[in-house]
Amino acid sequence: MTQIELRGIEKHFGAVQVIKDLNLTIADNEFIVLLGQSGCGKTTTLRAIAGLETIDEGDILIDGQPVQHIKAAHRDIAFVFQSFSLYPHMTVFENIAFPLRATRGNRTDIEREVQAVAKTLQITHLLVKKPSALSGGDMQRVAIGRALVRRPKAMLMDEPIGALDAKLREEMRAEIKRLHIKQGSTTIYVTHDQVEAMSLADRIVVMHEGVLQQVGSPHEVYARPANMFVAQFVGSPVMNMSDVTVSEDDGHARVVVRGAPTSFDFPSNLTAQLAAAGAQSGNLTLGVRPEGVLVSRQAREGYVPVEAHIIEPLGSHDIIDLQVGDQMLRARTKSGFVPRPGEAVWARIDPAQAHFFDSSTGTSFGIRL
Amino acid sequence: MAAVQTRSERALNRLAIAAVLVITLLFLAPIYWITSTAFKPRNLATTIPPTVVFQPEISPFVKLFTKRSQLRSAPEPEVYAAAPWWERLVFDGGEKVVRSGRGEVQLSGYPNRFMNSLIVAITSTVLAVGMGTFTAYGFSRFKVKGEADLLFFILSTRMLPPVVVAIPMFLMYRAVGLNDTHWGLIILYTAFNLSFSVWLMKGFIDEIPKEYEEAALVDGYTRLEAFFKIVLPEAATGIAATAVFCFITAWNEYAFALIMTNRRAQTAPPFIPSQVGSGLPDWTVIAAGTFLFLLPVAIFTFLLRNHLLRGMSFGAIRK
């Protein structure tokens, strides 16, 4: 049972504030991913929880006990570094046994624990080797083994698979997930890779410039981004963003992308919802993911004519740049759906997948249609 | 690789090999000279052209280690008969010197000076490398106020040629009674080497990723334990290299040893040439003394060769 709570964390590096009033509660056994660009404060947050970094303000509580004044060694937390940090002068066995030797357990206990962890991670055959003789993936397994062997209160991982190549990353991602399900320990995982975050997390914590942007399940963060930053940071290709104006016309809401001659049809309750949310005309941004842009090759009710500009065939699907006014709208279609660039097609925006943001603050109005 | 070498590349390669050979010979020549002279009979030591083929002897070493006095003529037959085998080696060479003392063997000044050299060089190396490693670790891992200035200050102690301050140092040492003591020289050499040791070790410790210690800190170790269990083994290469340099500097130092010591704490470097002046110079004895003097550095470097070599392949590990 380990619950971690962050209350009003503030941290400065010189004049730069890297964490601003961070509040977060992490439940027992939860897999939390801190997601953000480099320099957003996610690693600093992780290091602060581990005790490798001091904080200027706020409280870090582990199981209700404030720990910000307790040394890293006494917080009973394991840390997996991006660089793996396996000690080159020790064998794999000694590396995994290292945390156990700190508490001076007896030799046979240590031997048994190390063997058990090695078996879980399927690295028993590597125990006698030196880290320099291992592949990247095996180094990572050993690093995780070193973290697991002590059965810590919580596991902290700082981009643990960031240094591996793409294929191995995918493999290790699955392995980390499997391990978490099997061992079940409170885990905080830092990454800048949204795919990793989406696939691993129970809850994702999106951070930007030291400020927590949104906390939610992968689905929530993807389908209901709290603001423009989250909307554009999560999801690939990125969400389309256009300045729009909304007007009402014979039972329909009409959304006009700036500079476009035609408008997109939306259900009429959009205007009422926007008004209720306090949105001001001229300060409105429409966000829609490429899969929310529906494309047709024939003229259809509610579809507007657009021109296919660039086609990126990606095998399983195509990404098509559609010219709408002076802006580009990226759409996702079946592969080969639009055969050639330059082709005239028709498009509409799926109202259920549309997001409306305040252009100046970036906050979502939370409109659901 | 070799297969795609052009003719000009091959010629250049051979030229480079030839140059390396010449340079190696140039460096080895004095060592050969000293070594061969140390095993020559006295009458072959100064021949022109130099004698290359000769029957090696150990009599120069016997003369080096025992105190002797000059005789007017060849030793009396009864003296010869009473002499031990190693003494006869000296007489057989036609030498008119006999060891001093009656019966018991009197050692010359050399073994004592050699011991002094060892004591001073080893102690000052241990101190300089030890203090240097701790200091470098502090500079490398902690935020030190005025770090750049302090490091420059440490380096600046090397900017003045040490001999310039020899006279004031001598007066200071005499005032506090440190002249002609082991500690006097040890303090002096440690001070010489410390700045060098700090700078060199800082470079090596900077190379060790911080995460190693952080991993240990998270895993329940104190910083001091992490230093001894993680940093020191990782820095072994650097420590070995630094130790070799410090040892060589302290072992070879001549000027201060000459000024600060004369008897009790005198080291080998000022002692060996002082033997030239007493009577006719016996070059074989001087060569024997020099030859033995070269050995510890050679042995020390040889023992640490793996670490020194590893220094070249350092960084082959994923960071």
Image (cartoon, coloured by chain):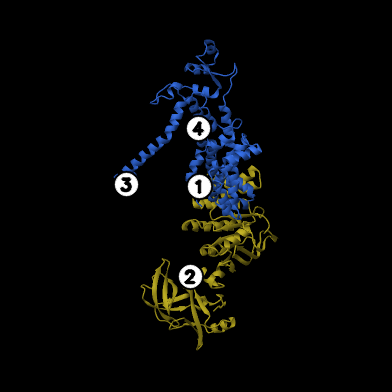
Chain colours: A yellow, B blue
Residue toward you, A235 or B196: B196
Residue toward you, B165 or B48: B165
Q: Residues within 10 Å of mark 4 (few under 14, many from 20)?
A: some
Residue highlighted by disc 2: A238
**Amino acid type of the residue that numbered disc 4 sits on in the rendered structure:** Leu
**Amino acid type of the residue that numbered disc 2 sits on in the rendered structure:** Val
Q: Earlier in the sequence, mark 3 or mark 4?
A: 3
Q: Are marks 1 and 2 in contact (CB under 8 Å)?
A: no
Q: Earlier in the sequence, mark 1 or mark 2?
A: 1
Query: Circle 1 — which element?
Result: helix
Q: Quadrant of residue A364?
A: bottom right
Give percent across and percent down for residue A63: 68, 60
Q: Residues within 10 Å of mark 1 (few under 14, many from 20)?
A: some
Residue toward you, B279 or A273: B279
Instruction: Find the distance from the CA under tag 3 to the CA under tag 4.
Output: 44 Å
Instruction: Find the distance from the CA under tag 4 to the CA under tag 1.
Output: 38 Å
Q: Residues within 10 Å of mark 2 (few under 14, many from 20)?
A: some
Residue highlighted by disc 3: B4
Which residue is rendered at x = 55% and y = 20% of the image?
B68
**Amino acid type of the residue that numbered disc 1 sits on in the rendered structure:** Ser
Residue highlighted by disc 4: B294
Q: Do marks 4 and 1 share a subunit?
A: no
Give percent across and percent down for residue A298: 39, 79
**Which is in the foreground here, disc 3 or disc 4?**
4
